[in-house]
Image (cartoon, helix red, strand yellow):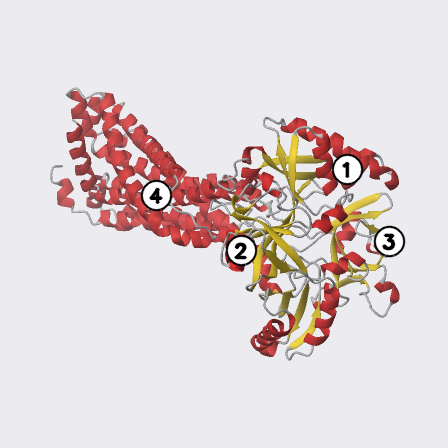
């Protein structure tokens, strides 16, 4: 029996070769997209799986009730008090700095070592990297110890057994206490060297408001998260609020609402890459992966729809075969199994082809996402094969069930194609396919317009020809003096027009914030310590008041500028703001507002412009230590030559032996668009795949359905019908289906794309054009695809179809 079924299957594949190729192509493309996105998702979920303590390590996040946001940082007193008072907390690790680089000197050589991290001393208790040399006991005790990776050890010493050796950097001698092997698996925690910021931690021990540390807690197994959050609120948040509420003149509840934190969130270590609300390593983007995965599944569904439609249409041609088999005793079960076998063969061949195509495309996919994914995870094969089984069942069962339920006498008469069951089935499934196609067209156009809008939006500053060089963290004990010296010397380099500094350059993410208080009102605001000329240097516009002036003594002490968002957040008018004194949390003196500048973006356009205060870097003594860059506006006539002169000067006279970390501000800010540009690219590719699969399916289906009407065409042509009339008659049904599908897709697309646009602070209004274009485009494509076969039908051989009439 099985042998006969296989023979019948291959005969039908050959007979309907066009639909067979289209089914193979559609399923192969769909499964390839599904596997690539699934591998991407699986790779993102695999972070920190190497850690044997991952089930008990949680990343701590704070919740601010007033702004309804989660924060990724904590202060040392918070962590210390949690360890002392909350039994569920067994240990914690703080991270204060990452991506550090120093010029390190050993007995043999000097090497610039990058990717360092500053942490608290119990780091290895929570992150037990494989130990190669030395000991983790007291590995980070005191201020002159360092642990290094095997890679760093080879760079510095040429070997890995170097525990006890000395390294000199940052004007200090450090002893290597441990050498470790970094995990080969995915991890966000891969420091090449680790040091303890001893003096900084010592100074921050009692500073409740210094939220400069990321924190991982080691919890007891079985800890109840809700109970833990309640203990944090009562034993830590309320405790801190009681200390500070009375001097602030507010109640504990009001203090928590204004200054926070008012809540906490604990995310498991192996979930923070995708599922945390906010992290030290950047905001997770789980939503984008879900969207891509859903779209890839939709493509597979489209392929399955093609399969169902084509199998149903072909089944009507085989009605007499089915009728004969039922008449001679074939059971309903046998018919269903036969159809499932025919479907499975196509699906399995598509699965094999998709594995090969995925392997071919994987290098480019890795390059696109900057990954190193390989097809070695059994989950990929299992879930993709499971998808094949699902497609087989859905695509095979629907036409098989309809056929198997028909009476033998009906199938012998060939009435399936004309039955309401067959017509409604094909039309309904074709409508669903076109609804999905319409959504992809509308969604692709809206995403394209949103990205284009963001790329062309006036940012409120002019970053053209502004070249930034970062000092790095290379032991500059008084970096502001270095900046002031460089400012004088580099102004003499030909091609340099002007020079300035800012704590918060656009596109870098280098910003700090604190509470900004006025009487009993407080907001969170960004800091913008800067040189006097910075805002004019960046082309920012003055809205009201005046600029800071170094010749006015008050401007060198306690005067400041704010942006429009700052004024709006307090609910003031411009005139009211110019009369106010602000007490920022970073200082104990009031600042007078002497000017309001127009809002300008320093972060991604996905976020609103935040309240910001601007002041000279010398006004607050500790802000001087944040002077870590110099920005130069270059003359337009010889930018390349000027950049070469700047690099030579820097590498030879300023920081010899250190890599030059430099970029143009406008190009740096453009990187904030990369995520959305990638979404745009992927959506465009998926859109093209959907349209190709849908149109090929439409062509094959229309071919089969028109072939069933060739006798009708021959009769009408004999009676004098013109080619145009015949073509319109054959395409009319498909045009109506397309129109209905687009009308159904419009509210669905509107809702889904409006939800996507809600994530952007600066977004387009929902445009009408994509919806209209989707309708027009699909109608034209439907007409073109179907009319090709309809035109061929008008050239039918009349004798062939009428000789027995």
Disc 4 marks which residue? 732
Earlier in the chain: of badge 3 and badge 1, it is 1
Question: Residue tagged by mark 1?
Answer: 257
What residue would you read off at disc 2? 152
Q: Nearer the viewer, mark 3 or mark 4?
A: 3
Mark with earlier residue (2, 4): 2
User: Which corner quadrant holds the C terminus?
Assistant: top left
Direction from residue 170 to residue 10 in the image, left or right: left
Q: Residue at x 29, y 47 (%)?
A: 727
Q: Which residue is mark 3?
A: 590
- Asked if disc 4 and disc 1 are in contact, CB closer than 8 Å, the reply is no
Quadrant location, the N terminus: top left
The answer for how far apart the CA atoms under marks 4 and 1 are is 63 Å
Q: Is residue 345 left or right of residue 622?
A: left
Check contact, mark 1 vs mark 2: CB within 8 A.
Answer: no
Q: Tell me which label, 2 or 3, sits earlier in the chain.
A: 2
Q: How far apart are the two marked residues, 2 and 3, measured between alpha carbons?
A: 47 Å
The answer to whether the residues at label 2 and label 4 have Cβ atoms under 8 Å apart is no
Judge depth for marks 4 and 1 and give the one in front: 1
Q: Earlier in the sequence, mark 3 or mark 4?
A: 3
- Nearer to us of marks 2 and 3 is 2
Question: Which mark's residue is nearer the viewer, 2 or 4?
Answer: 2
Mark 1 or mark 2: which comes first in sequence? 2
Q: Earlier in the sequence, mark 4 or mark 1?
A: 1
> Residue 713, located in which quarter of the rendered image?
top left
The span from disc 3 to disc 4 (Cα, nearest Å) is 76 Å
């Amino acid at each position: 029996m099985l042998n006969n079924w296989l023979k019948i299957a291959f005969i039908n594949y050959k007979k309907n070769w066009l639909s067979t190729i289209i089914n193979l192509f559609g399923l192969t493309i769909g499964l390839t997209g599904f596997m690539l996105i699934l591998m991407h998702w699986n790779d993102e979920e695999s972070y920190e799986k190497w850690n044997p303590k991952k089930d008990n390590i949680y990343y701590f996040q704070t919740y601010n009730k007033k702004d309804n946001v989660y924060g990724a940082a904590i202060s040392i007193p918070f962590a210390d008090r949690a360890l002392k008072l909350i039994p569920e907390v067994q240990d914690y690790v703080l991270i204060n700095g990452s991506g550090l680089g120093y010029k390190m000197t050993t007995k043999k050589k000097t090497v610039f070592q990058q990717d360092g991290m500053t942490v608290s001393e119990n780091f290895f208790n929570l992150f037990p990297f494989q130990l190669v040399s030395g000991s983790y006991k007291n590995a980070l005790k005191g201020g002159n110890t360092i642990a290094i990776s095997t890679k760093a050890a080879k760079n510095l010493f040429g070997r890995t057994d170097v525990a006890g050796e000395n390294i000199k950097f940052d004007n200090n001698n450090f002893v290597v206490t441990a050498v470790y092997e970094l995990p080969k698996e995915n991890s966000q925690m891969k420091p090449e060297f680790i040091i303890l910021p001893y003096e900084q931690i010592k100074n921050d021990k009692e500073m409740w408001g210094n939220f400069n540390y990321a924190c991982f807690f080691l919890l007891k197994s079985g800890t109840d998260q809700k109970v833990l959050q309640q203990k944090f609120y009562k034993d830590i948040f309320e405790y801190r609020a009681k200390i500070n509420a009375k001097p602030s003149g507010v109640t504990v509840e009001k203090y928590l609402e204004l200054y926070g934190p008012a809540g906490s969130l604990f995310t498991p270590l192996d979930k923070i890459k995708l599922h945390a609300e906010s992290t030290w390593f950047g905001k997770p983007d789980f939503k984008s992966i879900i969207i891509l995965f859903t779209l890839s599944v939709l493509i597979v569904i489209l392929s399955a729809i093609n399969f169902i439609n084509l199998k149903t249409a072909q089944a009507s041609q085989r009605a007499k075969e089915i009728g004969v088999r039922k008449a001679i005793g074939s059971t309903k079960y046998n018919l269903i199994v036969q159809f499932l076998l025919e479907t499975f063969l196509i699906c399995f061949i598509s699965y094999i082809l998709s594995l090969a195509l995925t392997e071919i495309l994987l290098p480019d996919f890795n390059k696109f996402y900057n990954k190193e994914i390989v097809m070695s995870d059994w989950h990929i094969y299992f879930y993709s094969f499971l998808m094949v089984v699902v497609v087989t069942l859905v695509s095979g069962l629907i036409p098989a069930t309809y056929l198997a339920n028909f009476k033998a006498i009906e199938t012998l008469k060939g009435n399936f194609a004309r039955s309401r069951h067959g017509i409604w089935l094909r039309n309904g499934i074709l409508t669903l396919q076109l609804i999905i196609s319409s959504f992809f067209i509308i969604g692709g156009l809206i995403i394209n317009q949103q990205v284009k809008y963001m790329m062309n939006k006036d940012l409120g500053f002019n970053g053209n020809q502004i070249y930034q060089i970062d000092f790095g963290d290379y032991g500059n004990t008084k970096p502001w003096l270095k900046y002031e010296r460089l400012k004088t010397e580099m102004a003499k380099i030909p091609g340099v027009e002007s020079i300035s500094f800012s704590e918060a350059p656009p596109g870098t993410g280098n910003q700090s914030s604190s509470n900004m208080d006025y009487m009993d009102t407080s907001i969170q605001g960004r800091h913008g310590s800067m040189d006097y000329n910075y805002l004019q240097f960046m082309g920012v516009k003055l809205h009201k008041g005046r600029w800071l002036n170094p010749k006015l003594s008050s401007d060198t002490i306690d005067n400041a500028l704010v942006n429009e968002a700052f004024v709006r957040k307090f609910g003031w008018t411009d005139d009211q703001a110019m009369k106010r004194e602000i007490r920022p949390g970073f200082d104990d003196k009031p600042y007078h507002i002497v000017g309001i500048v127009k809002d300008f973006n320093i972060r991604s356009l996905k976020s609103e412009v935040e309240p910001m205060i601007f002041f000279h870097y010398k006004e607050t003594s500790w802000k001087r230590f944040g002077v870590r860059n110099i920005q130069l506006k270059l003359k337009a006539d010889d930018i390349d030559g000027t950049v070469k002169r700047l690099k030579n000067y820097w590498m030879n006279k300023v920081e010899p032996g250190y890599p030059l970390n430099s970029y143009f501000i406008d190009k740096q800010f453009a990187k904030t668009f990369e995520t959305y540009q990638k979404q745009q690219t992927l959506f465009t590719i998926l859109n093209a795949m959907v349209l190709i699969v849908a149109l090929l399916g439409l062509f094959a289906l229309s071919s089969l359905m028109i072939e069933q009407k060739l006798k009708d065409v021959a009769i009408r042509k004999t009676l004098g019908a013109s080619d145009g009339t015949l073509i319109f008659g054959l395409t009319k049904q498909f045009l109506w289906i397309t129109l209905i599908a687009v009308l159904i897709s419009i509210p669905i697309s509107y809702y889904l794309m409006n939800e996507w646009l809600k994530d952007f602070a600066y977004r387009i209004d929902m445009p009408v054009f994509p919806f209209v274009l989707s309708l027009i485009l699909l109608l034209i494509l439907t007409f073109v695809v179907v009319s090709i076969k309809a035109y061929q039908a008008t050239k039918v051989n009349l004798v062939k179809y009428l000789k027995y009439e």
